[in-house]
Image (cartoon, rainbow, N blue to C red):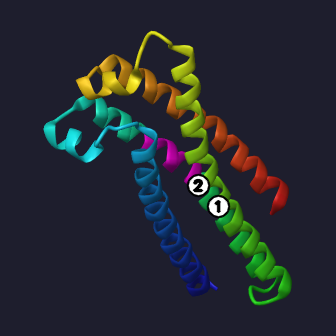
């Protein structure tokens, strides 16, 4: 029983790592489309702290949401083990948990995009992305706060989805 639990734990860890890497990769790829002309890699190489804060906040936001999805996946795997992992119910529970995790990733990226667009509408006198290019740390912190706040709220929603489905 101890060996079985250790193997399940290792499998869950490997799945979590895979989804985390995929989510961060997708997040960084989508970020290039959100940032309207900022070459994040070039700006980071130049030492643009404002862009660094912004990129870091996107990674933290994605991690918060993915963590909730990974927790749901772990719960799903444990429930599947209880009913038989290869049974119809077991496969269904794991499948639903994986779909929920993917939904969490999509929600995180979508919410970040939406939050930044709303922020842009609210702050008509500030071109946030132009300010980021200039290295404006105050604007970077404002954007980071919005991104992380949205992620915390989305994280609660993902946890709610997990509780309702699994």
Q: Which is nearer the eye, 80 or 100?
A: 100
Residue for point 32% across, 21% down: 131
Question: Which residue appears at 55% of the width and 83% of the height?
Answer: 7
| Residue lying furthest bottom | 86
The stretch in magenta equals 58-67
**Residue 114 sits in quarter:** top right
Q: Is residue 65 magenta?
A: yes
Q: Residue at x 56, y 54 (%)?
A: 66
Residue placed under numbered mark 1 in the picture: 101
Q: Nearer the viewer, residue 88 or 146?
A: 146
* CB atoms of marks 1 and 2 within 8 Å: yes
Quarter of the image with the N terminus is bottom right
Q: Is residue 80 magenta?
A: no
Residue 164 falls left or right of residue 158? right
Q: Is residue 54 above or below residue 124?
A: below
Task: Tell me the CA gap for discs 1 and 2.
Answer: 6 Å
Name above or below for residue 63 compared with residue 84.
Answer: above
Q: Residues within 10 Å of mark 1 (few under 14, many from 20)?
A: many
For mark 2, what is the residue? 105
> Principal SS element in the magenta part?
helix
| Coordinates of residue 57 in the picture (x, y in percent) | 42, 37
């Amino acid at each position: 029983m101890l060996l079985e639990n250790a193997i399940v734990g290792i499998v869950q860890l490997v799945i979590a790592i895979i989804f985390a890497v995929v989510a961060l990769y997708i997040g960084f790829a989508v970020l290039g489309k959100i940032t309207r002309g900022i070459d994040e890699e070039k700006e980071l190489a130049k030492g643009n702290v404002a862009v660094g804060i912004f990129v870091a906040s996107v990674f933290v936001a994605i991690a918060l949401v993915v963590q909730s999805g990974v927790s749901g996946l772990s719960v799903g795997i444990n429930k599947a083990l209880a009913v038989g992992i290869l049974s119809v119910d077991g496969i269904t529970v794991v499948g639903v948990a994986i779909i929920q995790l993917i939904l969490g990733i999509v929600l995180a990226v979508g919410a970040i995009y939406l939050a930044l667009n709303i922020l842009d509408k609210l702050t008509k006198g500030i071109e946030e992305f132009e300010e980021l290019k200039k290295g404006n740390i105050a604007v970077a912190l404002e954007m980071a706060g919005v991104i992380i706040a949205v992620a915390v709220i989305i994280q609660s929603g993902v946890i709610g989805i997990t509780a309702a489905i699994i």
